[in-house]
């Protein structure tokens, strides 16, 4: 069980907003994290604390395939992103690198910026400590269970290849 | 089955696949670039294999920050170069390189009926050739480089039919911007977009590449076209590798079918800060611009440069702005040179650059200052996409961008004095 404050954003938060391309001449996650969300929220990278949570409306992570986007969110210490829907490539990338995502329209409606949120990733439970409301995220498709259980795609592939 | 379903079934050893099903897909080409390649290489090395599954099916294209814009970019390009040398996979050096999605089909590296995955969201471009191309992240690419296959969820398909005769100056860019404006930036989320109809039969391969390229701007997983005679002869000029042309079954199940009469479509402009924020150019109002960019994987092909030159010939770029022209590949550049297009551009006062992504993603070669506005033939106009987060990008066809470069305002070529 992890808790932290919510940062709230609108619809179609694109990968250029999450990490502008001008910073993509490096791939070190900690370095990237310093510019996380910079073009839509100048303060985010400075004030975000480990355990905090990003909450957004529909189509979070649309745009480019840059894995730098989930990497920098994870490196910024964010526990998970809760959104109504996620863009397809961002969703894959986040699962592959082990950044938990929770798809839950009700939670997005029921969380305001600054609310303290507790999440139980494994059980898909979201609790808004500030208001007392609880929510359940859409479960991951079974197929992805193996990747998530391995902690990401690389470990999953490594184990599969090792097993022959 | 739809076109997407037929190709995916053939690549997963099945006779049939249905939307929503998770499958393991064998891939024919695995692509990455100078930004996504370094992470893919780093992750690949963690898997514990020494060699890529098949060097003939792996390609890395250093196109984003090349010719290297700074030391950090040079380091990334070097990692990609060294990995390709060590693995023997396809690689294109500056001087031979072009923007990946202009280059790969020119080089005969992607064929109808194939599955291409790339650590670049515009890998959907190859759908124009009747292939299934889709973008993924670097970790997916690392895993596919090791194994030769990748998991996918079979997408549902939305069918777009374009009928009628297009107006003057209207082409693929306007067709796709119109559709994105209609369905929205998540209108095809997780779905394949399949394009057809008489106006598509008429459309050039370049126009189709432009359309497939922007499927991702509607959230699409792929954007597919039937490989007709135009496509097949284009491919046969470039390679003698065998390929299969798939045609969607008459009984194909579509999530939705959307029809457009192209005679209703005016040249389109997508306003900041979403590609779906489209308006007909006649309703653009008075937008004064500081820069025009003609190039990118969307509109950096020879046909695009021909249209731009047609508009710019004998005219001058307004003294209030910069017009930057970026041929998408060396062969596009060479062809433009032979046809006299480059001379037209330079005489008109345009800057012509070596092939690169450059300003398209705010990398280099034409970055915007705060408060500046650009019209660009690129595919994204998100906040900060071409530079300052306080700048603005308007998306259009090469015809509208060239006309706007002359007038200083966003304008239809027909309205030029
Ligand atoms: S031209 Fe632009 S959209 Fe195309 S691959 Fe390069 S950066 Fe991406």
Image (cartoon, helix red, strand yellow):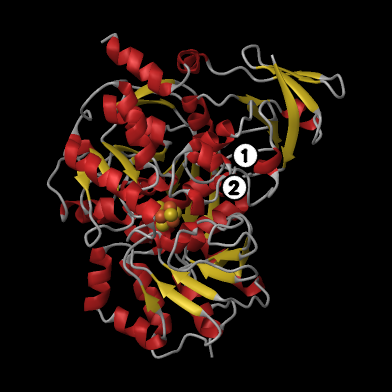
Q: Secondary structure at mark 2?
A: loop
Q: Residue at x 69, y 32 (%)?
A: A49
> Which residue carries the number 2 mark?
B185
Image spot of residue B272 (x, y percent): 63, 61
Q: Residue at x 25, y 10 (%)?
A: A164
**In this rendering, position of residue B121 left or right of residue A42:** left
Q: Is mark 1 within 8 Å of ligand 1?
A: no
Is any part of residue B31 visible from this angle? yes
**In this rendering, position of residue A42 left or right of residue B163:** right
Query: Dividing the picture into quarters, in which one does residue B349 lie?
Result: bottom left
Q: Choose mark 1 or mark 2, whichever is in front.
A: 1
Image spot of residue B86 (x, y percent): 18, 38
Label 1 marks which chain's residue? A
Query: Dividing the picture into quarters, in which one does residue B9 lie?
Result: top left
Picture layout, residue B311 above or below residue A39: below
Judge by depth and name the residue closer to the eye, B160 or B409. B409
Q: Are marks 1 and 2 in contact (CB under 8 Å)?
A: yes
Picture layout, residue B52 above or below residue B240: above
Image spot of residue A74 (x, y percent): 57, 31
Query: Dividing the picture into quarters, in which one does residue A136 lie?
Result: top right
Q: Residue at x 68, y 20 (%)?
A: A137
Judge by depth and name the residue closer to the eye, B26 or A157. A157
Q: How many marks?
A: 2
The numbered mark at residue A59 is 1
Label 2 marks which chain's residue? B
Which corner quadrant holds the C terminus of chain B? bottom right
């Amino acid at each position: 069980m992890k808790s932290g404050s919510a940062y709230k954003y609108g619809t179609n938060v694109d990968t250029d907003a999450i990490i502008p391309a001008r910073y993509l001449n490096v791939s070190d996650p900690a370095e990237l994290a310093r510019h996380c969300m910079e073009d839509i929220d100048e303060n985010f990278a400075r004030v975000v604390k480990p355990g905090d949570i990003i909450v957004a409306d529909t189509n979070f992570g649309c745009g480019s395939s840059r894995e730098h986007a989930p990497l920098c969110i994870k490196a910024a210490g964010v526990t998970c992103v809760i959104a109504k829907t996620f863009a397809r490539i961002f969703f894959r990338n986040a699962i592959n690198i082990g950044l938990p995502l929770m798809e839950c329209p009700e939670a997005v409606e029921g969380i305001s910026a600054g609310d303290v949120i507790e999440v139980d990733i494994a059980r898909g439970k979201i609790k808004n400590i500030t208001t007392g409301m609880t929510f359940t995220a859409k479960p991951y498709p079974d197929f992805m269970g193996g990747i998530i259980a391995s902690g990401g795609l690389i470990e999953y592939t490594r184990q599969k290849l090792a097993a022959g | 089955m739809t076109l997407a379903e037929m190709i995916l079934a053939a690549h997963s050893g099945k006779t049939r696949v249905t939307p929503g099903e998770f499958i393991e897909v064998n891939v024919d080409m695995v692509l990455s670039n100078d930004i996504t390649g370094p992470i893919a290489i780093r992750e690949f090395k963690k898997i514990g294999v020494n060699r890529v599954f098949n060097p003939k099916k792996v390609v890395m294209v250093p196109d984003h920050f090349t010719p290297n814009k700074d030391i950090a970019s040079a380091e990334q390009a070097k990692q990609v170069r060294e990995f390709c040398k060590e693995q023997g996979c396809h690689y294109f050096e500056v001087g031979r390189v072009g923007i990946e999605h202009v280059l790969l089909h020119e080089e005969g590296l992607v064929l109808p009926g194939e599955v291409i995955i790339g650590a670049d969201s515009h890998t959907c471009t190859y759908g124009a050739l009747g292939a299934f191309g889709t973008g993924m992240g670097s970790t997916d690419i690392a895993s596919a480089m090791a194994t030769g296959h990748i998991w996918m969820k079979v997408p549902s398909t939305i069918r777009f039919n374009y009928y009628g005769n297009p107006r003057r100056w209207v082409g693929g860019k306007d067709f796709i911007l119109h559709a994105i404006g209609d369905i929205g930036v998540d209108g095809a989320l997780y779905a394949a977009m399949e394009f057809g109809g008489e106006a598509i039969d008429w459309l050039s391969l370049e126009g189709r590449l432009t359309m497939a390229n922007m499927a991702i701007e509607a959230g699409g997983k792929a954007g597919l076209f039937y490989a007709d005679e135009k496509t097949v002869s284009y491919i046969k000029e470039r390679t003698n590798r065998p390929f299969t042309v798939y045609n969607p079954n008459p009984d194909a199940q579509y999530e939705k079918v959307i029809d457009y009469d192209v005679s209703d479509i005016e040249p389109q402009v997508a306003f900041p800060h979403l590609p779906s924020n489209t308006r007909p150019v006649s309703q653009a109002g008075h937008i004064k611009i500081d820069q025009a960019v003609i190039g990118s994987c969307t509109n950096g092909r020879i046909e695009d440069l021909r249209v731009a030159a047609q508009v710019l010939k004998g005219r001058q770029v307004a003294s209030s702005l910069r017009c930057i022209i970026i041929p998408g590949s060396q062969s596009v550049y060479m062809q433009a040179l032979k046809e006299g297009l480059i001379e037209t551009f330079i005489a008109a006062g345009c800057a012509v650059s070596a092939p690169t992504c450059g300003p398209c993603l705010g990398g280099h070669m034409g970055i915007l200052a705060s408060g500046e506005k650009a019209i660009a033939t690129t595919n994204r106009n998100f906040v900060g996409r071409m530079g300052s987060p306080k700048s603005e990008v308007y998306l259009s066809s090469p015809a509208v961008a060239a006309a706007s470069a002359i007038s200083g305002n966003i304008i239809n070529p027909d309205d030029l004095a």
